[in-house]
Amino acid sequence: MMSRFDAAAQMLGITEEMYYILKVPARQVMVGLPITMDNGSIKVFEGHRVIHSTILGPSKGGIRLDPGVTLDEVRALAAWMTWKCAVVDIPYGGAKGGIACNPREMSAGEIERLIRAYTVAMLDVFGPDRDIPAPDMGTGPREMAWLMDEYSKSRGMTVNAVVTGKPLVLGGSLGRTEATGRGVTVAALSAMDKLRMNPYRSSAAIQGFGNVGSFAAELLHERGVTVMAISDVTGGYYNNRGIDISAALAYRNANKGTLEGFNGAERITNEELLALPVDVLVPAAKEDVITAENADSIQAKMIVEGANGPTSASADDIINEKGIMVVPDILANAGGVTVSYFEWVQNRIGYKWTLDRINRRADRNMKDAFDRVFETSQKYKVSMRLAAYIVAIDKVASTYKFRGGY
Ligand SMILES: NC(=O)C1=CN([C@@H]2O[C@H](COP(=O)(O)OP(=O)(O)OC[C@H]3O[C@@H](n4cnc5c(N)ncnc54)[C@H](O)[C@@H]3O)[C@@H](O)[C@H]2O)C=CC1
Ligand SMILES: O=C(O)CCC(=O)C(=O)O
């Protein structure tokens, strides 16, 4: 995060003072969460919430449950949220939360106790006008419902705008579940248009078949792209005639959320998936999967980053030299936070928008952001990634200048 931020800050010529204002997170909270496990033992989990910035509005960002969660990771993800919200022009700052745990090895009851304990520990952090969490890796509507319930109990009233990505009956928004994958699809189609690629004659490989990857696969397939490979934590599945995405979704849903044992495709590794001869590569699982070690093997014409930080900074130069167009994470996966914003707006006005209205607005917002970043990349003669940082840093820095007071 920092090396891309440094390069963009230098191009924009921001002052040293502004550089440090934008670099240092506004607040970081670490909590220890003792939880009674189903077998009666007590286990202590480490949770984090980092508020990177609130200059554009309340901070916004998901909560991740993953064994690899560290404070450093959450700090980078929080800063990315600041830049992401600025790129797509929504009135939020950036934050992220995480708890180091393995949800795949925990019961629903254990996860519920963990989410409730985390919410109680963060009562003075969260708030509909302060800091608004949402789902990320390992969390979804179920966890957001527990969070909303625990927060509401502490306030003595229902406060549904404290969190987004909720189930529909609790004030969730139509379209939020699929919003990130949908935004990835809009970003991919916009980039294909610039490269004069016909979706009906293009192929894709998608790493990760969770919330982001599976909806991206479904929607790209619907738009005519042949999805030749998908994968999850259990490995990759490749079929050069195209994966039957509906069958893969049905299989995953009936198989505890994984693709293990899915047939109709040849087994490959996640590493092999990245090097397939496809037109579009969508890393939509985790960070740092494309590195200086494997970047040279990538054959795709474009990379559309569904995950946050899937490409390590060390790979940027190699990818740029190969002429691969990268639609960076802070742009490509911003469809999720955009519809989260719409959910928050609906909660605050006490009204429900139709799916058609949400999708039209979200698609237009993503397309406008894509065009803004593309024009900036042409103007500064830089990659789409650097251009996205330039757009974001420029917006946040100029807001600071107008507000002053430091
Ligand atoms: N859910 C959302 O709305 C948003 C998510 N993101 C980012 O997208 C990425 C994926 O998030 P979600 O789809 O929500 O998570 P998820 O938990 O729904 O799905 C993650 C997927 O990645 C797979 N996976 C995990 N470890 C893997 C590995 N080592 N190799 C290959 N696949 C692996 C899992 O099996 C699963 O299919 C994360 O980087 C997240 O921060 C970004 C913006 C919004
Ligand atoms: O929907 C949101 O508020 C945030 C989603 C998120 O964590 C992300 O975009 O990385």
Image: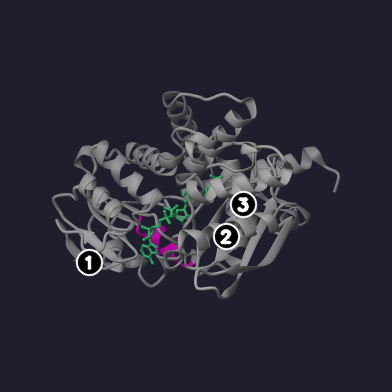
Residue 255 visible here: yes
Q: Residue furthest front?
A: 40
Give the amino acid at mark 2. Answer: Arg
Number of callouts in the render? Answer: 3
SS class of the residue under badge 1?
strand
**Of circles 1 and 2, which is in front?**
2
Residue at the (22%, 60%) spot, across then down: 237
Tell me the distance, in whole angstroms, between the alpha carbons under discs 1 and 2. Answer: 37 Å
- Disc 2, ligand 1: is the CB inside 8 Å? no
Q: Quadrant of the N terminus?
A: bottom right
Crowd class of label 2 (few under 14; some 14 to 19; many from 20; radius 10 Å): some
The label number, if any, that marks residue 11 in the structure image: 3
Lower sequence index among marks 2 and 3 = 3
x then y, percent, for residue 174: 45, 32
Q: Is residue 288 magenta?
A: no
SS at badge 3? helix
Identity, as a three-letter code, of the amino acid under mark 1:
Ile
Picture coordinates of residue 31, whole percent (x, y): 68, 65
Q: Residue at x 60, y 35 (%)?
A: 344
Q: Amino acid at mark 3?
A: Met
Magenta residues span: 314-323
From this viewpoint, is residue 172 visible? Answer: no
**Dots 2 and 3: beta carbons under 8 Å?**
no
Residue named by callout 2: 113
Q: Nearer the viewer, mark 2 or mark 3?
A: 2
Q: Residue 189 in the image: x percent, y percent? A: 34, 38
For mark 2, give the secondary structure: helix
Please identify the dominant SS of the magenta region. helix
Q: Which residue is mark 1?
A: 268
Question: Is residue 317 shown in magenta?
Answer: yes
